[in-house]
Image (cartoon, rainbow, N blue to C red):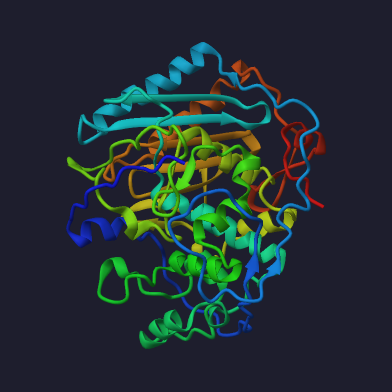
Amino acid sequence: MRRRPTRKRVTLEAGVVGCALLVAGCASVDDSAPSASSRPISTANTDVTTASAAASNATDPIELPTTSTFEPSTTAPVAEQRLDPQLEQRLQAILDAAMPSMLTPEATLQAAVLVGSTDTSWSGAAGRDDDANRPFRMASVGKTFTAATTLRLVESGAFAIDDTIDGLLSAETLALLSGDGYRVSEITVEQLLVHTAGLFDYAFGEGSPMLQRYVLLGEIIERTTGKPYAAAMRELLGYDRLGLEQVWLEHGENAPPGAPTISRSFFTTTELTDLDFSIDAFGGGGLAGTGPDIARFFEALLGGEVFDDPSTLDLMLRIPATNMGLEEFGIPFGDGASGLYRIEIAGNTCWNHRGFLGTIALACPAADLTVVVTTNTATTEPLAIASDLVIAMSQQRAQLRTVPAARRTGPDGGAQAAGAAVNRRRGRRTPT
C-alpha cells in the first residue's frame, strides 16, 4: 500500500482541540454488573498494513466466527444509479446556499446521499475543492464504527454488554481509573457505549487524557481480539464485504492505494490539515473516508448487514432513560444510544453521529435514505445542511429511479433488511 507522507506537527491550544474532540455525556454508574473474562479472541487474517503491533498480552486465542455466516454473492452486483437530474440540481443548490455560513472561503463542503435499496446515489461539493469524493476526517463519527465493532464481539460471545470493565482492561488502565476514584468493578461495557459510566470528561479539566470512554472500548477491542484496533475493526465490520474501499484509520493503517489527499480542515480560519490527529486515533475517532463509503456503512449498519443476529442492532439502538434529548455546547444531539443518536427530520426517524470537523452521518431506515455531510470546519454545524438534504429527498421521492426495499422496522425506528434476496444480490451477510 502507498504510505502517506509524514505530516508536520503543529500545536493548538489544548482547549480548542480537546473540547470538541471528546464529545460525551456523564451519568451514574450501575453497581450490579457482573465481572467478565478478557481471554483474547483471534479474528481472520488481514492484508491491511498496520502501524502498531498486536496487543502484547494476547494469549490463548479462541476463534471468532467472522466468516461462517457470510453468504457470497450469486448474482452480479447492483449497478449504481443516479438521481433525477432536477433533484441533483436541488441538492447541489443546498450546498451552494450553505457556503456563506462557512467561516473561511478556503474550506470545502462535501455531501453524499444514498438510497440503499438500489444504490441510487449522489455526491456533491461546494467551495474551494470540487472533488465531492475526496476523503475527509470523520472525527467522532468513528465512534459509530467503534460501537458496532464492540457489539460484534458481544454477539460472538466474547463478553456480555453488561460485563464490567475490570475483567476487560489492562492492569495499567484499571490502576489509572481506580486512582482517579472510579469503581471499575461497577462500570459496564454498555455504560461506556452510551456515555453513562460517570467518567469525567477530560476535555474540560485535569486528569488522565487517555481515559475517554471510547478510548477504553478501543483497548477492550484490542485485548479481546489480540489484534490492533484498526485491523480488528476492519475484519469484524467486514469492510471488504461491504465495499468500503476508502475507509481507513489514519494513525493505524496506510491510505488505500491511489487515494487522494485528505480534504483540508479548519477551526474558524485556522487550518488544521497538518495537525497530528493521533489524539483522536484510538476508539473515539481517527477514521478517514469518503462520503459515499461512510454513507454505505451507515446504510448497511441500520439495514441489518453488519450483525449476524438482528437483535444486536436492536441492542445498539437501545436508549437509556437518562439519554433523552441530549445536547452538547447548546447543540441538540438527540436521544443517545450506543454510538448513535436518534433524531426526527421531516417526519423521518434518523440515526446519526456528528464529529468535531463539521461532520455528520445519518441514516433514516424507513425512508431508505442515508446522508453524509462534512463542512471540514469545526465551527460550522452540519445538521441543518443534512436536514435540508433529507427534506429535499423526502419531498421529491417520486423522482427517484428506485423501488424501496422491503424492510422490518424494529424498536425505536431501527430497521433491518427483510429479504434474503436483497442480501444475495449484494453478497451481504444473511442473519442465521
> In the rendered view, would you say 416 is above or below 172?
above
> In the rendered view, would you say 230 is above or below 221?
above
Q: Is residue 337 visible?
A: no
**Quadrant in the picture for residue 258:** top left
Position of residue 10 measured from the top left corner of the image (x, y, whole percent): 19, 52
Q: Is residue 110 left or right of residue 205?
A: right
Position of residue 95 measured from the top left corner of the image (x, y, whole percent): 36, 25
Q: Nearer the viewer, residue 244 or 317?
A: 244
Q: Which residue is drawn at 51% across and 42% down?
A: 362
> In the rendered view, would you say 147 is above or below 188?
above
Q: Is residue 43 left or right of residue 10?
A: right
Q: Residue at x 53, y 66 (%)?
A: 222
**Quadrant in the picture for residue 179:** bottom left
Q: Which residue is drawn at 43% across and 54% down?
A: 252
Q: Nearer the viewer, residue 93 or 358?
A: 358
Position of residue 109 measured from the top left corner of the image (x, y, whole percent): 34, 31
The number of callouts visible is 0
Q: Is residue 90 left or right of residue 337?
A: left
User: Which residue is most to the top?
Assistant: 85
Position of residue 308 measured from the top left corner of the image (x, y, whole percent): 73, 53
> In the rendered view, would you say 164 is above or below 20?
below
Q: Is residue 278 visible?
A: yes
Q: Nearer the viewer, residue 251 or 378?
A: 251
Q: Which residue is drawn at 51% across and 77% down?
A: 169
